[in-house]
Amino acid sequence: MGSLGLDRLVEVQALDTLLTQLGLALSARGLKLVTAESCTGGLIAGTCTSIAGSSDWFERGYVTYSNEAKTELLGVPAEMIERHGAVSREVAMAMALGALQHSRGQVSVAVTGIAGPGGGSEAKPVGTVWFGFARGQDFVQTEVLLFKGDRTKVRAAAVRHALVRVLSFVGND
């Protein structure tokens, strides 16, 4: 196996370990995770459900790629999207809260960004990803990161970051 194959194997094993830790942390607290995804197109939900036993801690996932889907499925006000853009702190926060309001989950992660190769601007270059994390309706955090690389790398980095942050958000004893 070449070094590229070994690197990929280590990456997959590390992701499985991360998912196991996340599942244990959520289960120990009796919490279920909900995802609201735009630029990752369901990859976070797909990653979560790739391991056996995830039904114990994963509630559901929303793929809200279009602005209309963000409004219809998550209740993000169309005026907010118009005013701030779909890739914004405000929309990430509204997506995270909307995912909880429209599900039976207690913890959510929302992702909205520009994976590329087009669609970027000077203010929001390709690789810009906003994250929203909510635990209940009263505790929400947001953050923005700029990931480097092509579309596949940006999306993969966003998935990994989202899972790591959910784990730290929930707590890992």
Image (tube, helix red, strand yellow):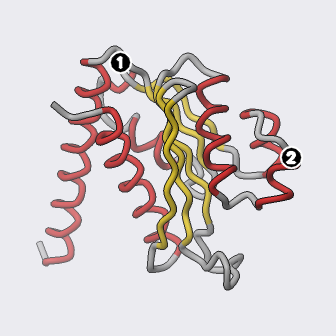
Is label 1 in a helix, a strand or a loop?
helix
Q: Looking at the image, which residue is at 45% across and 29% down?
A: 33
First in sequence, mark 2 or 1: give its number.
Answer: 1
Residue type at mark 2?
A: Ala
Q: Nearer the viewer, residue 140 or 56?
A: 140
Residue type at mark 1?
A: Asp
Query: Is residue 167 rendered to the left or right of residue 70?
Result: left
- Image quadrant holding the C terminus, namely top left
Residue 160 sits above or below residue 106 on the image: below
Neighbor class of circle 2 (other Cα within 10 Å; few <14, some 14-19, many 20+) is: some
Residue 74: % across, % down: 72, 34
- Image quadrant holding the N terminus, namely bottom left
Write down the quadrant of residue 129 in the picture: bottom right
Is label 2 in a helix, a strand or a loop?
helix
Query: Is residue 93 rendered to the left or right of residue 15?
Result: right
Q: Are marks 2 and 1 in contact (CB under 8 Å)?
A: no
Q: Nearer the viewer, residue 74 or 64?
A: 74
Neighbor class of circle 1 (other Cα within 10 Å; few <14, some 14-19, many 20+) is: some
Reading the image, the residue beneath label 2 is: 78
Q: Looking at the image, which residue is at 37% across and 23% down?
A: 57
Residue 71: % across, % down: 80, 40
Residue 152 sits above or below residue 102 on the image: below
Q: Nearer the viewer, residue 80 or 95?
A: 80
Give me the disc on residue 106: none
Q: Nearer the viewer, residue 136 or 68?
A: 136
Residue 88: % across, % down: 66, 59
Q: Looking at the image, which residue is at 49% across and 41% down?
A: 133
Reading the image, the residue beneath label 1 is: 56
Residue 37: % across, % down: 59, 47
